[in-house]
Image (cartoon, rainbow, N blue to C red):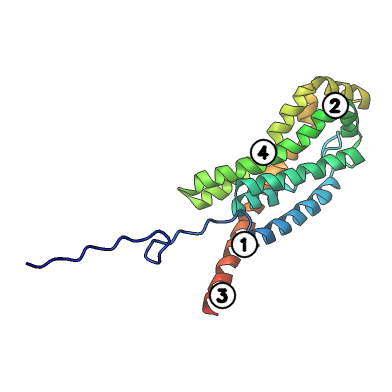
Amino acid sequence: MEYKEAAEPVEMGSEETAPKKPRKRFFDAKSIAYFGILTALEIVLLLWGSAVPVGAGGASLNFSLVPIVLGAILMGPVAGALLGLISGIAIFIMVILGAQGPVFSYLFAAQPVMIALICLVKTTAAGLVSGILYRLVAKKNQKAAVFAAAVAAPIINTGLFVLGMLCISGAVEASAAEFGFAQTSAISVILLVFVTYNFFIEFAINLVLAPALCTVIRVVEKRFAKRKGKA
């Protein structure tokens, strides 16, 4: 009668144990490079957009939503939120310095805390929601996910701006009287003076540029990976 040798138990940490997959770091070398480039780009776009006033209230275009969306797509919701926070801080500094026009300087003097919250929250939330939405939609269709993220950013950004301004409607109406706007109610001042065409222009820019730039980055990444593999 033959006896089979019993299998020796595998000790923890031995070579026969299945290797664990390394945890993906939040910021690897590539992500840090992307983050630095996108941060520089959003600051440049903010300064450039501030030189293009839209509407009677001195409001300007926010082109920094494009790099925020790109960061949310390429690096995730947290990176998108951080890029949005940096954009919000830059906008708040511009309000303090008067670069956003006399109306926003007046509103800051009347409601400094709320103006600070509006500046910081709206772009941060835009980056966070864009990243979350991209991850959810990308499970079914990656191209649709890119467009969903690009669309979400200006909607969240403008929606929170309008909501925040409604919270200080008294100061908004006082600014209308101070600067002689034709509109008197807070909602009409917000929509017709502050928002005006900003939302539609920012929406169109994000819908076109964010997916296009994302496609270019993906193509460059693939070609670089192929060349690296051949090398």
Asked if the residues shown at circle 1 and circle 3 are in contact, with their CB atoms under 8 angstroms apart, the answer is no
Mark 1: which amino acid? Answer: Ile
Residue in view at x 51 percent, y 59 percent: 22
* Residue 41 placement (x, y as % from top left): 75, 56
Judged from the image, the secondary structure of the residue bearing numbered disc 2 is loop
Which one is earlier in the sequence, the residue at label 1 or at label 3? 1
Indicate the quadrant containing the N terminus: top left, top right, bottom left or bottom right. Answer: bottom left
**Who is closer to the viewer here, 171 or 89?**
89
Q: To which residue does mark 2 refer? A: 111
Which one is earlier in the sequence, the residue at label 4 or at label 3? 4
Asked if the residues shown at circle 4 and circle 2 are in contact, with their CB atoms under 8 angstroms apart, the answer is no
In this picture, residue 1 sits left or right of residue 227: left
- Residue 117 appears in the figure: yes
Asked where in the image residue 113 lies, by quadrant, the reply is top right
Find the distance from the CA under tag 2 to the CA under tag 1: 41 Å
Nearest to the eye among marks 1 and 3: give it. Answer: 3
Q: Is residue 149 above or below residue 169?
A: below
Which one is earlier in the sequence, the residue at label 1 or at label 4? 4
Find the distance from the CA under tag 1 to the CA under tag 4: 24 Å
Asked where in the image residue 4 lies, by quadrant, the reply is bottom left
* Residue 188 placement (x, y as % from top left): 77, 24
Mark 4: which amino acid? Answer: Ala
Residue in view at x 77 percent, y 42 percent: 88
Which one is earlier in the sequence, the residue at label 3 or at label 2? 2
In this picture, residue 65 sits left or right of residue 7: right
Q: To which residue does mark 3 refer? A: 228
Q: To which residue does mark 4 refer? A: 125
Q: Is residue 70 above or below residue 113?
A: below
Mark 3: which amino acid? Answer: Lys
